[in-house]
Image (cartoon, rainbow, N blue to C red):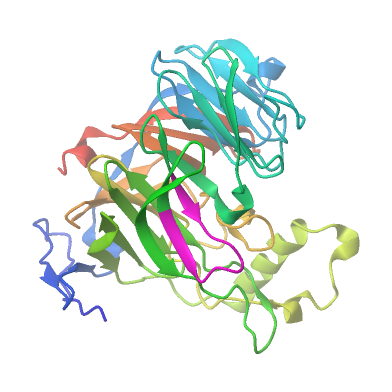
Amino acid sequence: MFVGLATGCGPEDVGPTPIVQDSAGVQLVRHGPLADYGRAVYPAEYILTIGDMEGPPDMLFAEVAGVELLDDGTVAVLDRDAAEIRQFSPDGSFLRRISRRGSGPGEISGDFTVGLVGIGAGRLLVPDAINQTVTIFDREGGLLESHPWDILQSYMPEWRAASDTTLAVHLWSATAPWHVLAHRSVAGALLDTLAVFAVRPSFNPVDQRFPVWADMLVWSAREPDQAVAGWMSEPRVILFRRGMPVRRISWERDEELLTEEQHDVLLGIIARNMDPGEIPPDLRAQVRLPERLPAMADVETSADLVLVQRARSVERLDQRITYANRGPSGFGGPLWDAFSFEGDYLGVLDLGAPADVFDIRGDTILGVREDSLGVQQPFLARIPAELREGR
């Protein structure tokens, strides 16, 4: 059992947060409500934004599922709706299309193409849940390798490159009792374990109502043997090294209980995700409405920081983090709370618009953001120096 030490959290408290240990040697860092710290909000420094509503088709994106920065500075973007990868020069000029919709060699399914992973030497790896393959292309789009994978046994939202030959993936299936963050080879061999969590039920077996959102595990990984993970419902993340928990960073929730009016907003989000002819008249009776918003929509790590994206209001809640659609995808809002790996709360990173962050390379964020009209723009952005240096 974790036992923590509450710490002061006024704006004047700028020193390190006291750390205690539980009986298993896990370091515990507990914060009060993060809003009480009065920390600064730092805007992200955008390096490159691709996408133009009035531009050519090459610049229009419908459902970006991955952004990769290759070793020559080019940027690859996977558009799941178009079932293709588009490659751009370092200045954002369009270069080429890679792959196409299909189930043959070098083709991808589209809707269930999981993501895009750069694995060194300009290679791009694409896991596909319909084709049940992992396909590797060279930087010019040539097919290098294709491996059969039981991808439906690997939870889909995130895959990461651990090295040129190793992937960090989330392994889970409906029949397994554990969520496992693990290293696997590009051919699928299980190499080692980064973290393990017990599976939580997706609906209440007593009332049989499905939740507005499932209590999903969100995670990120850094090399050589480090991962950070936590449940959407809980205001805490756990850092793992070599498969063992070493530090837990938690904070006191400051979100109020949801009102009936806010519940109506959530029901409207669910209804918008359904075919009009399929919306049951008793929708409220068929879903379990939450008392609060999720504590987290996503978590990411850089070499020095743990970034937590919180869902801060119903009014700005994106429909993609509801259970009725695809589960959490990271579009929880533009603001990310930044912690050091030691657990100190440093401030807020502002991406300026709802964004899905796919990875962080050094101080560079790879992601996609959306404007008020829902237009998607893949981007590269730099984490401000004030956050990186803990000022």
* 311 left or right of 222 in image: right
Left or right, 111 with respect to 243, comes to right
Relative vertical location of residue 24 with respect to residue 390 in this rendering, above or below:
below
Instruction: Name the foreground residue: 157 vs 24.
Output: 24
Relative to residue 169, is residue 137 depicted above or below? above
Quarter occupied by the N terminus: bottom left
Q: Where is residue 149 in the image (x, y as percent from the top left)?
A: 60, 43
Q: Out of 308 and 261, give the one closest to the viewer.
A: 308
Residue 312 shows in the view: no
Residue at the location (53% across, 37% down)?
369
- Residue 45 point in image, percent of width and height: 35, 29
What residue is at 26 percent from the left and 42 percent from the top?
Answer: 224
- Viewer-nearest residue: 295 or 42: 295
Residue 305 located within the stretch drawn in magenta: no
Question: In the visual, does 24 lie left or right of 34?
Answer: left
Image spot of residue 338 (x, y percent): 29, 50
In the image, is residue 164 above or below residue 74? below
Which quarter of the figure is the C terminus placed in?
top left
Mark yes or no: residue 105 visible: yes
Task: Indicate yes or no whether the magenta region holds residue 175.
Answer: yes
Query: Which residue range is magenta in the image?
Result: 168-181
Total labels drawn = 0
Q: Is residue 95 above or below residue 78?
A: above
Which of the 4 image quarters holds residue 5? bottom left
Q: In which quarter of the image is residue 90?
A: top left
Determine which quarter of the picture holds residue 33.
bottom left
x%, y% of residue 184? 44, 44
Seen at 21% across and 51% down, the residue is: 341
- Asked if residue 359 lies left or right of residue 41, the reply is right
